[in-house]
Image (cartoon, rainbow, N blue to C red):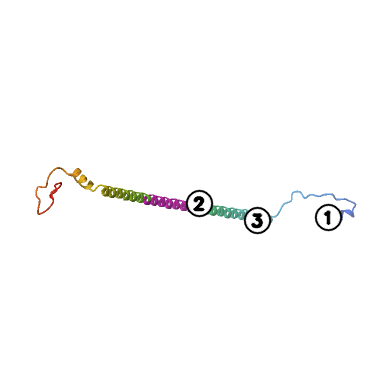
């Protein structure tokens, strides 16, 4: 518009440097169109915001699920390790107990070989001092040698 005014004003000897339109009124249709465009833009921004929030919520849920899965895996691994350690300790205890019993049996066997009268000593230690009330047949009488 300025260029048209400047061109037309030259023939009259007027130089147009600027112009302003004051109190400009838009018709109702234009104002409604601008208002509708603003509402649509706001709706689009709201939908975009909701989409972003949904993405953030989904990512948060995914991260929490991964964390819970990792925690469950670590708990299971810890429980499995504890069971392995417990079983190993029990097996070692059984082994040591068996080795101790075997050593005790060997020691007793060695003691019996070295002293055959040890059996009679053990019998005497356990005897309550009473002779049997009935002896049948050729049953031996404890601590009495009949040979």
Q: Position of residue 22 (x, y in %)?
A: 76, 48
Q: Which mark is residue 29?
A: none
Q: Secondary structure at mark 1?
A: helix
- Please identify, in this view, whether the residue under mark 2 or under mark 1 is nearer the observer: 2
Badge 3 element: helix
Is disc 3 in contact with disc 1, using a CB cutoff of under 8 Å?
Answer: no
Type of secondary structure dominating the magenta stretch = helix
The image quadrant where one finds the N terminus is bottom right
Residue at (69%, 56%) from the top-left corner? 30
Residue 65 image position (x, y, % from top left): 50, 53
| Mark 2 element type | helix
In the rendered view, does 104 fall on the left or right side of 88?
left
Range drawn in magenta: 63-91
Task: Please give the residue where the numbered disc 2 appears in the rendered image.
Answer: 67
Front-most of residues 21 and 104: 104
The residue where tag 1 is placed is 3
Of marks 3 and 1, which one's residue comes earlier in the chain? 1
Residue beneath label 3, please?
37
């Amino acid at each position: 518009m300025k260029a048209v005014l400047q061109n037309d004003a030259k023939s009259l000897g007027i130089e147009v440097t600027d112009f302003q339109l004051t109190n400009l009124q838009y018709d109702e249709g234009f104002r409604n169109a601008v208002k509708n465009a603003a509402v649509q833009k706001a709706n689009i921004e709201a939908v975009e915001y909701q989409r972003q929030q949904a993405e953030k919520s989904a990512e948060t849920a995914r991260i929490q699920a991964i964390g819970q899965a990792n925690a469950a895996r670590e708990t299971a691994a810890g429980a499995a390790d504890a069971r392995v350690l417990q079983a190993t300790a029990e097996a070692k205890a059984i082994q040591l107990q068996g080795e101790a019993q075997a050593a005790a049996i060997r020691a007793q066997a060695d003691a019996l070989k070295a002293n055959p009268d040890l059996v009679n000593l053990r019998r005497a230690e356990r005897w309550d001092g009473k002779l049997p009330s009935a002896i049948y047949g050729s049953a031996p009488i404890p601590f009495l040698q009949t040979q």
